[in-house]
Every structure is written in C-alpha cells, then in structure tokens.
Image: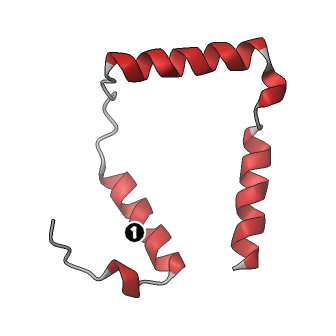
C-alpha cells in the first residue's frame, strides 16, 4: 500500500491526531467477529468475571497513558 504521507516524519502528536482522524472516519457499524475471535473474547470475559484481580481498571490504564505521555 502506498502512503500519501511519510508517517516516519510525523511527530508523535501528529501521529495521534492522524489516528483520531482515521477513527472518526469509520462508520462505527457493528464489527462482525470471526467465531474463533468471539470465542477468545468470551473466554477472556469469563476469566475476568471469575477473577477480577487479574485485570487493570480503565482508570489505571488512562493514568498509565497520561504518565507515559508526560515522559515524552
């Protein structure tokens, strides 16, 4: 696939902006998952429901991302 822009020359902030623009351009229709992918997700959800201590909360993920962004 040929790229109209040289992604390597973009700053990290420009890349994140590009990701946002690409995401916003999607029509957000429901995604049809392959059966094996659906089974894997169902398995992971069930595992998380059995033992929630093995996961990380959304707040923790967002805090980690914010800390990583500040370090840049």
Q: Is residue 4 placed above or below 30 in the rendered structure?
A: below
Question: Quick one: quadrant of the C terminus?
Answer: bottom right
Q: Identify the residue shown where x is 51% and y is 22%.
A: 41
- The total number of labels drawn is 1
**Which residue corresponds to mark 1?**
18
Residue sitting nearer the eye, 37 or 60:
37
Q: Quadrant of residue 39?
A: top left
6 horizontally vs 43: left or right: left
Looking at the image, the residue that sits furthest to the left is: 2
Question: Quick one: quadrant of the N terminus?
Answer: bottom left
Residue 13, horizontal then vertical, whole percent: 53, 77
Residue sitting nearer the eye, 25 or 52:
52
Residue 63, horizontal then vertical, whole percent: 78, 55
Q: Identify the residue shown where x is 34% and y is 27%.
A: 30
Residue 27, horizontal then vertical, whole percent: 29, 42
Residue 2, horizontal then vertical, whole percent: 15, 71
Q: Identify the residue shown where x is 34% and y is 38%.
A: 28
Looking at the image, the residue that sits furthest to the right is: 53
Q: Is residue 72 placed above or below 34 in the rendered structure?
A: below
Residue sitting nearer the eye, 55 or 15:
55
């Amino acid at each position: 696939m040929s790229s109209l822009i040289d992604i390597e020359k973009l700053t990290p902030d420009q890349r994140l902006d590009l990701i946002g623009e690409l995401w916003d351009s999607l029509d957000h229709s429901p995604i049809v998952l392959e059966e094996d992918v659906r089974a894997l997700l169902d398995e992971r959800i069930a595992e998380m429901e059995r033992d929630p201590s093995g996961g990380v909360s959304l707040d923790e993920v967002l805090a980690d991302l914010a800390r990583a962004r500040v370090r840049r």
